[in-house]
Amino acid sequence: MSIVGGNNFYSDDASHLAQIIDHINAGIWEFNINTRDVKWSAGFYTILGYMPGEIECSYNFFLDHLLYHHDKPVFLDSIHARGAEQTNIVQIRLLTKSQGYQWFESTTQKWENGDGPKFTGSLINVNQAKLLRLHSAQNNLLFNETGAIARISGFEIDVPLMTLWLSKEAFDIYELNDKVKLSIEEAISFFEPQYRALLADAIDKAIKYCKPYDLELLFRSAKNNVIWVKAKGIPIIDDYGKCIKLRGILQDIDGIKRKSLALQASINLLNEQNKRLQNFAYIVSHNLRSHTGNLQFMVNLHEESESVDDRAEVFSHIKSISNSLSTTIEHLNEIVKIQTDVEQERKTVSFEEAFKNVMLALQSNIENTDAKIEYDFSKCPVINYIPAYLESIMQNLLTNSLKYRHMDRQVIITCRTIKDHDHIYMTFEDNGIGIDMARYGDKVFGMYKTFHQNSDAKGIGLFITRNQIEALGGFIKVDSTVNIGTKFTIRLV
């Protein structure tokens, strides 16, 4: 019998019953609410694998050391949330001496006698039955989820063995015979290179830290078909909170994903076009207002002038303003034309052929400046682009480098292409006078913005170049150091 505080758990006249209870693999306990005294039967110790007295018999020890922390709420509710004489049955996990946490069925009842209100209860080991039910429920959940949604497959990783199981539907996504055995590493290798590390890291964290994951990744099947898939994994933990299995789904979401990407691209393009439209409206308003204001002033001055010489001088200013206004309208027309030409059919264009055409057009400028022009398009020889746009971009950048050359050294201009995954880049680099980026960095591509004293500087070429590049979904950036040179990097697509 268990002795707590010097009192027998059972009275002497019930000793025969006590012996029977202690041998049926069940434990009996009693808790006095007022005194907080606890009594455990010998069978209570036995079903947990301990000898009577081997562990502390107390309310706090039971809650803090034996009862699994996630099961505390349900156990405490079974004690405190019930009325008198009401029996409550719950299932909880208790830490045994040598078998870890196991499932027990706890029956609790409240009653009162001369010693005050008490709780009594019994514990029965139901671990084997509980694990069978859990395993069955997990399997049902896996198959029900897999079958409920079209084009979803299941997978499971056995963590101790680090082996992979795939459902038949998963082999269909892989486009492999379901007799093939894949390792985890082999399964990951079917994903596109840029996504492999992401998936491997997600699996690693799920196993080590029990973190679920939900990823959308590009996948290449055994038959070389590239599709978008959803990879979702949920860790299955043991009683100690360690991941023992990683279970999840692999779903073909290619159609939905591509529509989503196309929609997002359209939204981004629309936003960019709206920004350019607002910028264009500002430019038109600002530039035309300036011209018309000057023109109106000169007309009024012409009307007020009395001498022929004064009128002639004022009229010459009116002609100058008129010419400037005509040039501005031409520039604005070029910008409008960019937006309308963007729907032109793209063609496969050779970078070298386009660059040679530009150098031929600027041959006199190149010879007059004794410029050394170098180019290397070997890393990406061709591009699907609007030919006129590519030559215009090249011509503006080459003209810019020749115009802002350093007078104390030979002009060296280098043009290269680079391909990075799905993107194509072109770089233009020179050893000219450079730009003070701290002062002008945010104005380099502005309309009519100039940063040097060149008399032929108009501030329109780079503005048009940026608009052409952005109209086709690319971008341009500049790095420059005064008296060292300038480098333009353009992502064309």
Image: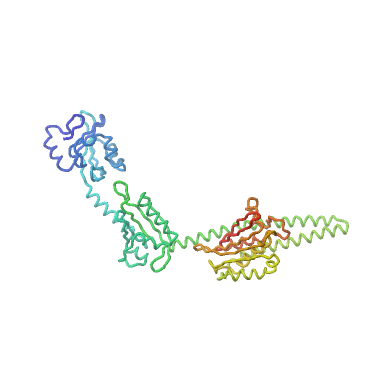
Give left or right: position of 2 versus 393. Answer: left
Residue 175: percent from the left, percent from the top? 36, 67
Quarter of the rendering occupied by the C terminus = bottom right
- Determine whether 206 is above or below 192 in the image: above
In the picture provided, is 437 more to the left or to the right than 101? right
Q: Residue lying farthest top? A: 114
Q: Position of residue 367 (x, y in %)?
A: 69, 68
Image coordinates for residue 282, horizontal then vertical, percent: 66, 55
In terms of image quadrants, where is residue 201?
A: bottom left
Quadrant for the N terminus, please.
top left
* Residue 233 at x, y percent in the picture: 36, 55
The answer to whether any part of residue 285 appears in the image is no
Count of numbered circles on the image: 0
Q: Which quadrant of the view contains residue 350?
A: bottom right
Q: Residue furthest right?
A: 307
Residue placed most toward the observer, 250 or 402? 402
Q: Is residue 352 left or right of residue 86?
A: right
> Which residue is depicted at the point 19% across and 29% down?
6
Which residue is drawn at the image coordinates 68% and 66% (left, top)? 366
Question: Which color scheme is applied?
Answer: rainbow
- In the image shown, does 22 or 77 lie closer to the viewer? 22
Q: Quadrant of residue 361?
A: bottom right
> Does 207 sit left or right of 266 as displayed?
left
The foreground one among 358 and 239 is 358
Q: Is residue 22 visible?
A: yes
